[in-house]
Image: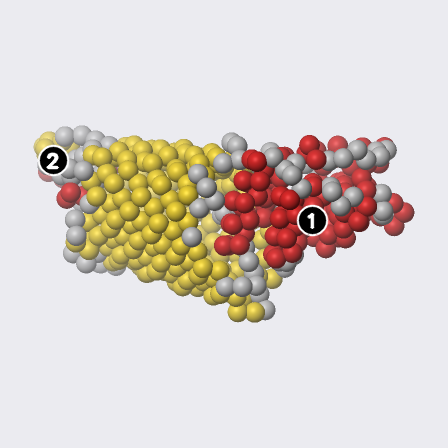
């Protein structure tokens, strides 16, 4: 799940514009409400303030705290009313203007929100705040506009090093029980190969609103990777997707068709066709849950025995912290069934989990990372290794994206994968480091 531009803008400006908050009269009620908000207890703050609105509406500090609490619990219209009262008394209150912009975004009034952010810029914020506003306004215009058609595109180039370009075992020989435990020496191309690489990628996404909360979604992406010396492992992949989404209040329903192809050394290695469905609910301004399901047909033109149908289903949760950090977690079940008869040892079932997050290091740099785990148990004994295969796969991702401008970014990242298996031929580890230059349109 991605963090929306609206959430990122609100969090960053909440931190970066605190110096702009002017002196306002405080009392026991507002002190308590502020303490609750600082502790992340927005619902309690809203319950404390809302009953007093009729008596205290018009007091700038009370209205600001009420507006902020209402926004945090998803009462966006109430937030707008309260913050409008603040700005009527104090038009120069930058923080209130930034928060009302976030409320307008939550209500789908994108153009009004963008106008408010432009007003914030004109009020003389520091250069790093201005750059942050520019970058995320661009993001909102590209991805969060619910009224007009949105077309985005990118091109990127990467260079890196991979110590296992062919995802092979990190050993020279294996003993195979089905052949009397005779050690078999692996060929050079069968075991892990290391190499440097360069890659080029491009893609585009279209979002066309259809009215009544419906939107048409379409996308295309392709990546070509060339190794410096191991050209036999050069790869190319391309994917098309087409779908529809429906937004109803805090719920977003999405159905997407996907078609893709994967080439190795100029030969078609695998095709996939899939259907994905997802329900996402924005619980409030900082919390999001989702449930998803996916069916994919995997077809291997030169290895029919590997053809399979794959099912994945799970749930996820994401939380945006006040400090500008987002964290997410998901769990899922997976099952893969071969199409050929008599090869059940190629089918498996299992489960997995993912954890990750990101944080704003400064106005131009976002740090991100994640970890994943997947357990797979195969259905029948492998005829060569005379046992049911079991895999435990671990993954780690660390990286940072530095925004050179609002369109250009540079991303160094490190990926590590370790697959532990009771079948020696399937044990491997892989480390990959890359630096990517990206241009968004």
Ranked by sequence position, the earlier of labels 2 and 1 is 1
Query: Residue 274 in the image: x percent, y percent?
Result: 36, 60
Left-right relation of 209 to 179: right
Relative to the observer, which residue lies in front, 204 or 354?
Answer: 204
Q: Which residue, given by chain and number where applicable, does mark 1 sit on?
A: 100
Badge 1 density bin: few <14, some 14–19, many ≥20, Cα 10 Å: many
Query: Residue 259 in the image: x percent, y percent?
Result: 33, 60
View extreme (bottom): residue: 211
Q: Quadrant of residue 158?
A: top left
Residue under the image location 58 percent in, 53 percent down = 281
Q: Which residue, given by chain and number where applicable, does mark 2 sit on?
A: 188
Relative to the observer, which residue lies in front, 219 or 371?
Answer: 219
Question: Is disc 2 placed on a helix, strand or loop?
Answer: loop
Query: Residue 219 in the image: x percent, y percent?
Result: 39, 59
Residue under the image location 47 percent in, 44 percent down = 406
Residue under the image location 39 percent in, 47 percent down = 439
Query: Residue 54 in the image: x percent, y percent?
Result: 87, 50
Residue under the image location 33 percent in, 52 percent down = 202
From this view, report whether residue 384 is shown above or below residue 298: above
Figure label count = 2
Left-right relation of 165 to 358: left
In this orientation, does residue 392 appear?
A: no
């Amino acid at each position: 799940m991605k963090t929306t531009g609206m959430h990122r803008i609100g969090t960053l400006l909440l931190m970066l514009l605190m110096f702009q908050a002017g002196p306002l009269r405080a009392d026991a009620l507002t002190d308590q409400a502020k303490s609750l908000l600082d502790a992340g207890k927005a619902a309690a703050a809203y319950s404390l303030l809302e009953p007093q609105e009729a008596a205290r509406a018009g007091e700038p500090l009370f209205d600001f705290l009420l507006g902020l609490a209402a926004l945090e619990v998803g009462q966006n219209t109430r937030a707008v009313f309260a913050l409008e009262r603040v700005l009527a008394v104090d038009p120069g209150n930058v923080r209130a203007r930034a928060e009302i912009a976030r409320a307008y975004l939550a209500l789908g009034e994108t153009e009004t929100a963008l106008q408010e952010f432009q007003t914030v810029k004109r009020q003389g914020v520091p250069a790093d705040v201005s750059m942050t506003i520019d970058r995320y306004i661009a993001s909102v215009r590209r991805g969060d506009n619910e009224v007009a058609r949105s077309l985005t595109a990118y091109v990127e180039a990467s260079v890196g090093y991979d110590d296992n370009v062919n995802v092979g075992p990190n050993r020279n020989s294996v003993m195979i029980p089905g052949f009397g435990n005779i050690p078999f020496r692996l060929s050079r191309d069968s075991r892990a190969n290391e190499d440097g690489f360069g890659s080029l990628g491009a893609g585009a996404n279209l979002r066309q609103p259809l009215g009544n909360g419906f939107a048409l979604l379409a996308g295309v992406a392709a990546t070509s990777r060339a190794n410096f010396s191991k050209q036999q492992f050069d790869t190319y992949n391309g994917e098309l997707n087409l779908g529809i989404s429906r937004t109803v209040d805090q719920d977003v329903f999405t159905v997407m068709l996907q078609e893709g192809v994967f080439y190795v050394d100029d030969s078609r290695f695998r095709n996939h066709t899939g259907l994905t469905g997802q329900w996402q609910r924005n619980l409030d301004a900082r919390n999001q849950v989702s449930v998803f399901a996916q069916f994919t047909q995997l077809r291997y033109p030169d290895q029919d025995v590997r053809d399979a149908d794959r099912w994945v289903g799970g749930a996820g949760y994401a939380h945006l912290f006040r400090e500008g950090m987002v964290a997410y977690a998901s769990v899922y079940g997976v099952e893969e069934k071969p199409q050929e008869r008599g090869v059940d040892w190629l089918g498996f079932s299992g489960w997995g989990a993912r954890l990750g997050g990101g944080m704003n290091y400064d106005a131009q740099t976002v740090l991100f990372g994640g970890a994943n785990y997947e357990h797979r148990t195969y259905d029948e004994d492998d005829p060569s290794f005379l046992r049911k295969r079991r895999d435990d796969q671990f993954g780690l991702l660390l990286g940072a994206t530095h925004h050179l401008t609002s369109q250009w970014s540079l991303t160094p990242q490190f990926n590590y994968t370790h697959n532990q298996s009771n079948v020696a031929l399937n044990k491997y580890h892989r480390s990959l480091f890359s630096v990517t230059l990206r241009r968004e349109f």
